[in-house]
Amino acid sequence: MLTAVKRPPLLQIWHWLVLLGAVGVVMALIYPDSFQQDGGFHFLYARSAWKHPGMFVEVWPRPLFTFLYSFPAQLGYLPAKLLTVIITLVTAYQTFRLAQQLQLEHPTWVAPLLFLQPSYLMLSADTMTEPLFALILVVALRLHEMKKEFAGMAVASLLILARPEGFFIGVLWGIWILLDRRSMSTIWQRFTSTAILAAGASLWWLAALMLTGNPLFIRDNWPPEWGVTSSADRSGAFWDYAHRLPNIAGPLLCALLILGLISALARRRLGTVTSVFLSFFLLHSVFRSLGLFGSTGYARYFVCVAPAIALLTLAGWNQLEAWVRGVPREVQVATASIIFFLSGLAAVSYTDSTAYTRDARAVAEAVSWYRTYGRPFSKMIYSQAYMAILRNQDVGERVRNGPNRITNLEIFRNMPIGTLVFWDGDTGPSWYGVKAEDLTTEGYTSLHSQSYVMQGWMNPRFRWWYRELWPRKQEMHLLYKER
């Protein structure tokens, strides 16, 4: 089904990278903010880390992400998002090379199969940690397949510096090495060599000690919501991620992912790729069902293993192609084109349906109003990260509100004269329990308030899967403490 005009694979992959790179740049321009608050705060940490060096080793922002993004972050939000575009394109190229190593047919197609994953496309121009994890993973897998086990383990050790799942992938990697019957080394030699898998964590601990002077900094900085004990109020169903496969691999392509997975297991092929995906899937399903490590059921987590998903999807497509060899080539090409076109529409509409990408417009309008009519402020409290990004706020000086409404109101009450509050009508009440009306009751003066009803950029007629059931209703408020 994927047979097309024969061109050298390198030429084909470069054509795909140019096209997908253009898509990434457009995504960065059309959606100037992250689809989730995490992306904005990751950027803020990266931008402020040189002023507050301890941020380079904090647990939640992740050290490797913060360090790499701290350079483009000094130039602005857009340059940082464009770094992600570059990372996703390099990941696509490395996945193509891995597909060649694994002797898969049509290896160049892994590039579009990556970007047609709705979650991958959504993060391809964002400032989230998953794309960086995916790049490290595919490079480590390539080294492992090239029989450069030591180098592969060294690269894999960096996964923990990008996301917490790196610890579990590191354990899996150690099992691969120990059970490798093709190795010429003894079991003891293999066991001692796995110590390199701790290199990334050791480097993190050493950097934290040097920057903070606290040998227990990582433990002390561990986010409280990332508990290692079961939490019923944060748990979900074991099958939550199975239900989210359309958001992970695509509403049409998820069937090919399953076919490729079954084919790989039946033929005992793609062992490392299959075990990475299955281990990741089972781990997150267990975490979700038990409420461990703050797992919230987001499909975006699987961007971490997007290269494995693309390779298995390609294996599924190749299997399907083998079954329909008798079908006229024109029908095969037409069917493949329709599947890819519909998958592309679904992937774009998945991003376009998110709430915070729309809130960015309202935040920008409020910032524009303040630049014209506002007054100087001594402190700023904000309910969304994009507010701080546009106002060039130092996240190290952020007033930290928690989920407790009474405590938050006390914080507002004790803020100095000249405090500016940039608040919205959704995140403010739902995350912090505080509405704009509560602040006026506390003595804050309302400078500006505006209500919004926002549609996505995409025409509803082209939404065949992720339908826009309702517009985004939002409010933006600027309040000032005068006395």
Image (cartoon, rainbow, N blue to C red):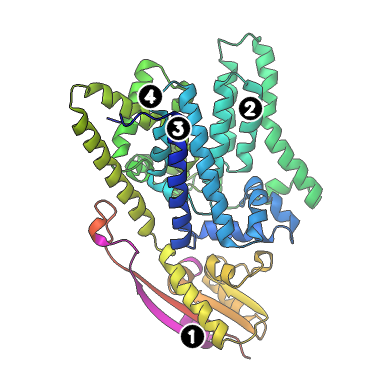
Asked whether the beta carbons under mark 3 and mark 2 sit within 8 Å of each other, the answer is: no
Q: Position of residue 375 (x, y in %)?
A: 61, 87
Q: CA distance from mark 2 to mark 1?
A: 55 Å
Asked whether the beta carbons under mark 4 and mark 1 sit within 8 Å of each other, the answer is: no
Within 10 Å of disc 3 (Cα), the crowding (few <14, some 14-19, many 20+) is many
Indicate left or right for 29 with 339 as reference: right
Q: Which residues are magenta?
A: 431-460
Q: Is residue 429 above or below residue 239?
A: below
Q: Position of residue 63 (x, y in %)?
A: 66, 47
Q: Earlier in the sequence, mark 2 or mark 1?
A: 2
Residue type at mark 4 is: Glu
Residue type at mark 3 is: Ala
Q: CA distance from mark 4 to mark 2?
A: 28 Å
Q: CA distance from mark 3 to mark 4?
A: 15 Å
Q: Secondary structure at mark 4?
A: loop
Q: Inspect the magenta stretch and tell me whether residue 44 lies in it.
A: no
Residue type at mark 1 is: His
From the image, tell me which residue sits under label 4: 105
Q: Earlier in the sequence, mark 3 or mark 2?
A: 2
Residue 71, picture quadrant: bottom right
Indicate left or right for 339 with 227 as reference: left
Q: Is residue 405 visible?
A: yes
Q: Secondary structure at mark 3?
A: helix
Q: CA distance from mark 1 to mark 3?
A: 49 Å
Residue visible at 28% across and 61% down in the picture: 468
